[in-house]
Amino acid sequence: MKNNQNSAQRLLEISVFLGIGTLIITYIVSTTSGRVAPFIPIISEMPFNDPEGSIFGIGLGISMFSFLILAQVFHKIFKPLSKEIDSNYENMNDLIRIIATLGAICGIITVNFNWDTYPILHGITAFILFTSFLIWNTFAYLVLEKSGKGNSLRKYAVYAGWMFYVFMAIFSVLDNQELQKEEGDFFYRMNNPPTVDTERSMYLNITAFCEWAMVFSFYTSALTHKKELEGISI
């Protein structure tokens, strides 16, 4: 019987399904308790209270740490493939490893330092997390595509990730501008995250939807890399 105890493929599955499961459980606990608006919360507004805060921080923290390990594994996998493409990709592979590692570390910080308590730290690390994961996913897609290992689902997941990332940024700015007119404070949203009592504008709802869609595109893309990890131990 094949031993999967130290399998990189198994670690990928743990990272993805633990991440998805944590988000779903956090959503259910926070909304059914009446502490978070069921439609449609920004992911970062869900863990303001316990027990959902602990579930969120621990679950996603482990998921992010797992990806940090996997980033090192993928660097080794992409090394010969990048070398075959050209020297630029070979150099980019080293840079992408650093970006992915930084993103995972920022992700661990993001999920454990909540928006309501540490707005600046949370905002900066969340931005680095999302951007770095998009960059890593794009690089992985390009390397595998150019190496004859293309995957249609991976391609659409990468495109969707960037699309929802851009839309999230646009509607977040529009929401902020609307609040700035009402409150006269450019940083009002950053310092006042939405709560269950917040009147949710269309811009805020679309921002939240795009964030959820973007995150699930990350997980979808990640699962398409299972084949590359087949037979690899950590």
Image (tube, helix red, strand yellow):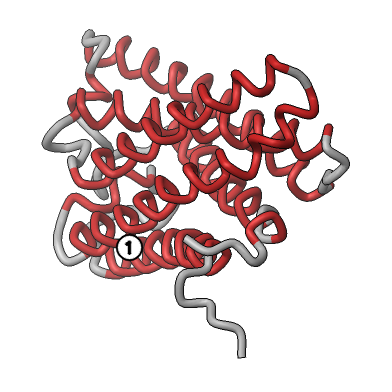
Amino acid type at mark 1: Thr
> Horizontal and vertical percent for residue 88?
68, 15
Q: Position of residue 213 (x, y in %)?
A: 57, 45
Label 1 crowd bin: few (<14), some (14–19), many (20+), radius 10 Å: many
Q: Between residues 211 and 192, which one lies in front from this camera angle? A: 211
Q: At numbered mark 1, what does the secondary structure look like: helix, strand or loop?
A: helix
Of 60 and 164, nearer the camera is: 60
Please give the residue where the numbered disc 1 appears in the rendered image.
26
Residue name at image x 60 percent, y 51 percent: 222
Q: Is residue 172 above or below residue 39?
A: above
Q: Is residue 152 above or below residue 90?
A: below
In this rendering, would 108 be left or right of 78? left
Q: Quadrant location of residue 204?
A: top left
As drawn, 88 above or below 69: above
Does 50 sit left or right of 2 as displayed? Answer: left
- Name, please, the residue furthest toward the left: 117
Q: Nearer the viewer, residue 174 or 59?
A: 59
Q: Residue at x 57, y 44 (%)?
A: 74
Q: Position of residue 160 (x, y in %)?
A: 68, 37
Q: Nearer the viewer, residue 203 or 95?
A: 95
Give percent across and percent down for residue 37.
Answer: 34, 53
- In terms of image quadrants, where is residue 49? bottom left
Residue at screen point 24% across, 34% down: 193
Quadrant of the snapshot with the N terminus? bottom right
Q: Which residue is most to the right?
A: 148
* Count of labels in the image: 1
Q: Residue at x 70, y 16 (%)?
A: 87
Left or right, 216 with respect to 173, comes to right
